[in-house]
Amino acid sequence: MLAARVTPAEHAAWRAKAVAAGVSPSELLRRAMAQTRTWTAPARAVERERTRQIARIGNNLNQLARWANTHRSAAEAVTVLANLVSFERSLLAVAHTAEDSGDAP
């Protein structure tokens, strides 16, 4: 049993949402809380670092795209592709780290 202070308007809105979802208000709240993520300080730091890494990779990718648009030759295309593969591996590594830490969306 859980008690919560809500206004009559909030209570009515929650009941209406529960009816629309075809569940009880209690079930609606349980489902909503099950989907709610909380962040600890370490999790925030990990997410901040992951965002920085992705931004760096994105910056490098933009530089590579700019370079590729400026210098178009077959020999250089191999270099561009090699760098793209490298960026892809970096992104996959960051995504894999997110999955391992349980922070993946």
Image (cartoon, rainbow, N blue to C red):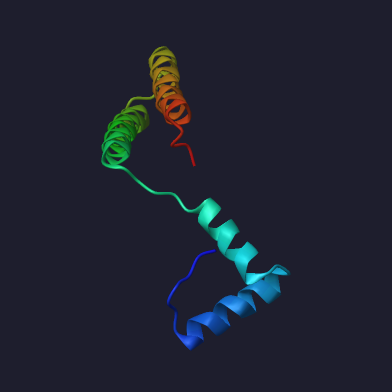
Q: Using the image, determine if residue 86 lies above or below residue 104.
A: above
Q: Position of residue 15 (x, y in %)?
A: 61, 78
Q: Position of residue 101 (x, y in %)?
A: 42, 29
Q: Position of residue 16 (x, y in %)?
A: 63, 80
Q: Quadrant of residue 13?
A: bottom right
**What residue appears at the point 26 percent right and 41 percent down from the top-left corner?**
41
Question: 38 left or right of 13?
Answer: left
**What residue appears at the point 27 percent right and 33 percent down from the top-left corner?**
49
Residue at the farthest front position:
1
Residue at the farthest bottom position:
8
Question: 1 left or right of 95?
Answer: right
Instruction: Count the labels in the image.
Output: 0
The one of 33 and 72 positioned closer to us in this rendering: 33
Q: Using the image, determine if residue 12 lies above or below residue 82.
A: below
The one of 4 and 76 positioned closer to us in this rendering: 4
The one of 75 and 97 positioned closer to us in this rendering: 97
**What residue appears at the point 41 percent right and 25 percent down from the top-left corner?**
97
Q: Quadrant of residue 24?
A: bottom right
